[in-house]
Image (cartoon, helix red, strand yellow):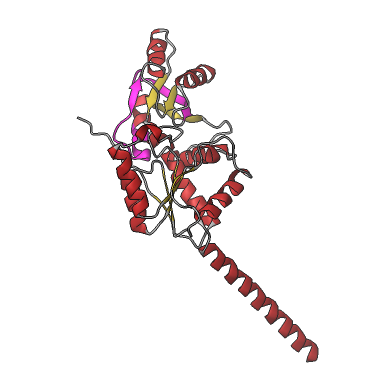
Amino acid sequence: MQTNRRQFLKTSFQGMTLATLAGVSRAREKTMSCQAVIDQIIKEMIGKPLSPTVDTIKMGDAIQPVRGIVTTMFATCETLEKAAAFGANLIIPHEPTFYNHQDNTGWLKDDPVFEHKRRLIEKHGLVVWRCHDTIHRMRPDGILTGMEQQLGWSSSRPGIYTISPQSVADLCAFLKARLDIPFVRVVGSLEQTCKTVAFSMGAPGGQRQMQEARRNPADAVIIGECPEWETHEYFRDAQHAQRNQALIVLGHIPSEQAGMQWLAQWLKAKFPHLSIRYVANTSPWTIA
C-alpha cells in the first residue's frame, strides 16, 4: 500500500507538472509579440531569415502583443478594416502594401492615398509584415501547395499537370468556378483540346514565362499576369507558327490567393490559441 501511495503521489505530481507547463505555454503564446510570431513563422518555414528580402515589417510596432492574425494577398484598406473589426493586429499580405515591390514610400511623400492608408494602420494599431520570399522558399512552395489544393491538382513535377482531356473553353470554365473569378483572358483557340497544363503563379516576368512555355510542351499555359507587350505577343506569334499552346491569364490575385488561405490553416496548427483568419481580396475590376 505504501508503494502504491508513493506511485499515486508521483503520478499525480507529474500530471500536475505537465498541466502547469501546458498552462504556462498557453499563457506565453497568448502574450507573444507580433515580432515573436513573425520570427517563429520564419523559423518553421525556412529555418532563418532571408537577406536581402522584401519580407519586412511595412508599418506598425511589432513589439506589441499579438491579438490576432489575418492573412491575405494585398493589405488593401478594405482588408485592414476587416482585420481591425476581427480584433486582429498582425496582417500578413503576400504582395506589396505600398504599390511597388520593395514597398519604397519616399516617392509617396504627401500623397493623399498613402496618407489615408498610413492613418488607417496607425488608427487601429496594426502591424503589416509581408510574407512573400519566405513562403515561396518553403519546400514545397507554400503558395503552390495552396493553389494545387484549390484546383485539386497534383504532380511529381510542380507546375506541370496532366488533366482529363477537355477544351480550352471547358478548362477556363473550371478555373473560373474553382477560383471564384468572373473572367479569364485567352490567347489561342477555345476549341483546342488540353491534356497537359503548365501553371506559372504570379508575375515572374515575361521572359521566364516564355522560356517555361518553350521547355514544357503543355497544351495550355496558365499564368497570373505579365506586361501585355511580352508574353501575350509571344503566344500570338506562336499560334501563327503553329505551336498550338493556349495562354490563359488569370490575373495576379487569383493565381496565388489560395496560397494565403492555405497559410492561415498552417498558422492555426502552429498557433492554436490565436485567432487567425484569411481575408480574400475581391476583384478590383468592373467589366464594362
What is the span of residues highlighted in magenta in the rendered image? 173-200
Residue 118 lies in what quarter of the image?
Answer: top left
* Residue 79 visible in image: no
| Quadrant housing the N terminus | bottom right
Residue sitting at x 69%, y 76%: 14
Classify 190 as above or below 125: above
User: Residue furthest toward the left?
Assistant: 288
In the rendered image, the vertical position of residue 125 relative to residue 230, given as above or below: below
Q: Nearer the viewer, residue 254 or 36?
A: 36
Q: Position of residue 166 (x, y in %)?
A: 40, 27
Q: Residue at x 40, y 24 (%)?
A: 226
Q: Give how far across and how far down residue 115 sits, in percent.
A: 31, 42
Q: Is residue 79 magenta?
A: no
Residue under the point 42% across and 34% down: 255
Q: Is residue 11 visible?
A: yes
**Can residue 199 be found in the magenta stretch?**
yes
Looking at this view, is 133 or 150 the one in front?
133
Q: Position of residue 196 (x, y in %)?
A: 48, 25
Tell me the residue at 58%/33% (across/down).
156
